[in-house]
Amino acid sequence: MLVNDVIQDTEAITTKVLRIHPSDNVAVAVVPIEAGTTLQIADSTVTTFEAIPMGHKIALQPIAKGSNIIKYGYPIGHAKLDIMPGAWVHSHNVQSNLGDLLAYTYEPVPAVTAEPVITGKAYTFEGYRRDDGKVGIRNEVWIIPTVGCVNGIAKTLARMAETIPHEFVDGIYAYAHPHGCSQLGDDQLHTQRILSGLIHNPNAGAVLVVGLGCENNQISLLKEVIGDYNPARVKFMTCQDVADELATGEALLQELVAYANQSRRTTCPASELTLGLKCGGSDGFSGITANPLVGEISNRIVESGGTSILTEVPEMFGAETILMNRCRNKAVFEKTVALINNFKTYFKSYGEEVDENPSPGNKAGGITTLEDKSLGCVQKAGDAIVEDVLAYGEIANHKGLNLLQAPGNDLVAATALAASGAQMVLFTTGRGTPFASPVPTVKIASNTKLANFKKNWIDFDAGSLLSGESMESVGDRFIQYILDVASGRTHVSAEALDKSELAIFKDGVTL
């Protein structure tokens, strides 16, 4: 990938079109381009014979029917018909190449054989050091139901707890979900793993787990998944076992809030950060600006000894070999192959096509095929080595870049990232979205127009990369913003919204 190199080329990105890789046979319109416009691209010229919307692709040369469309230096599909230079290249004349399961060969890039690069760069933040050694960037009290039947109780308790003195607690939140009963097999295990991961997330200074008593997801069973915990930090209540669940719950919250209220921020190295990497509502600029910027930040955090987690498995289809060849060893490679092919099998088990993506919003923004979307999506992983592959709900235990099994759905994926230990989610978007997740979710705009239009949603503008600012300069500003968020000096826009709904993956039968 040469995206970062291109972005640092100021002369290239201030023109009307951007060819991302020298071998590409399409370029991206940086601004809307009228029909009849003559464009200079490298050593050649092309004249448009139809209008090209901003963020969309223009053919740079004749592309014969059946030939591959090349973007980012990789195929993003093939031409459904002959395409002339200057034509608009999009869904009407491009077809995805994706289909059946594939066999893969491990062909590691040279960097895989090298030792992990730890620069020790002195990025620091002010965080909350927990008893288990983890560090939180918020000091909140969380109320987590085992089952949807007690969502109302959990929300009522959260409101009641606001009257408890909590000067050094950032907030008291109840997290509702519809699961925990009438579930079988993996569905129940998925619910238990997500709830357990949230209970262990260091942004929670204390946790009250609220059960009903007759649900499949009994507290005793959930405790088996939770494993070791600090009883001063995590307490449990079964509503059917007490006469007045509100009075009992409030008494437990008095203890938990008092416990969390003792926490204070201390200076911590960036090696204690775990960042979740996510995109949604992408457009034609996401893979050129916002996603590579997040990749730059992921690189810096990993080089500082920290952790990043990339998910959205269906949005790796078509770009998976880039990640596979960066796997630390053959074992991690095999786990990545299983990650990809198992998700394709899941699609096919429901009679769905593997390439049933991108969304209408993605297409309106200039993304044509799933490969087009995926090659932009994996930019968020930077160029770090893949150290591990996590099952859905599994907590990250390896420093460096991890891959996580979860779908592309924004809410499900962001919840999964929080359950895997992310204290913050970096969320890139070209269309904008207001959603919030249990951890601070930073919205990064791929273009300045969106950043200016939705200032109440967007936290950082990556569009300046299209105006000539270098990746190093934008990266310096963005990592400082991230450290400010981690230190509590800055709060992201989504933190002012309701973040009380958990989205948990469900696949099987509901009884």
Image: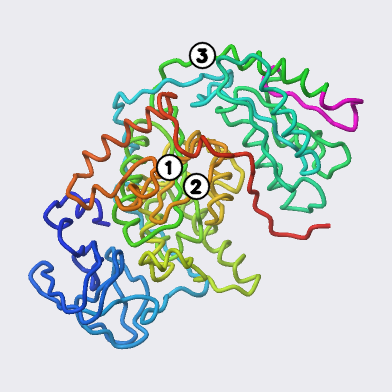
- Expressed as whole percent of the image width and height from the top left, the position of residue 36 reads 16, 79
Residue highlighted by disc 2: 434
Give, as a three-letter code, the residue at label 1: Asn
Residue 264, numbered circle: 3
Label 2: how many Cα within 10 Å (few below 14, some 14–19, many 20+): some
Label 3, label 2: how many angstroms apart (C-alpha)?
30 Å
Asked which secondary structure carries label 1, the reply is: loop
Mark closest to the chain's N terminus, 3 or 1: 3
Q: Is residue 153 left or right of residue 379?
A: right
Q: Residue at x 58, y 21 (%)?
A: 132
Q: Is residue 480 left or right of residue 402?
A: left
Quadrant of the image for the C terminus?
bottom right
Name the one closer to the observer, 394 or 294: 294
Q: Are marks 3 and 2 in contact (CB under 8 Å)?
A: no
Label 2, label 1: how many angstroms apart (C-alpha)?
8 Å
* The stretch drawn in magenta includes residue 234: yes
Label 3, label 1: how many angstroms apart (C-alpha)?
30 Å
- Expressed as whole percent of the image width and height from the top left, the position of residue 125 reads 39, 23
Magenta part of the protein: which range?
A: 232-246
- Expressed as whole percent of the image width and height from the top left, the position of residue 131 reads 58, 18
Give, as a three-letter code, the residue at label 3: Arg
Mark closest to the chain's N terminus, 2 or 1: 2
State whether residue 234 is above or below residue 439: above
Give, as a three-letter code, the residue at label 2: Pro
- Nearest to viewer (mark 3 / mark 1): 1
Residue highlighted by disc 1: 456
Asked which secondary structure carries label 3, the reply is: loop
Mark closest to the chain's N terminus, 3 or 2: 3
Q: Residue at x 58, y 62 (%)?
A: 342
Q: Are marks 2 and 1 in contact (CB under 8 Å)?
A: yes
- Expressed as whole percent of the image width and height from the top left, the position of residue 118 reads 32, 32
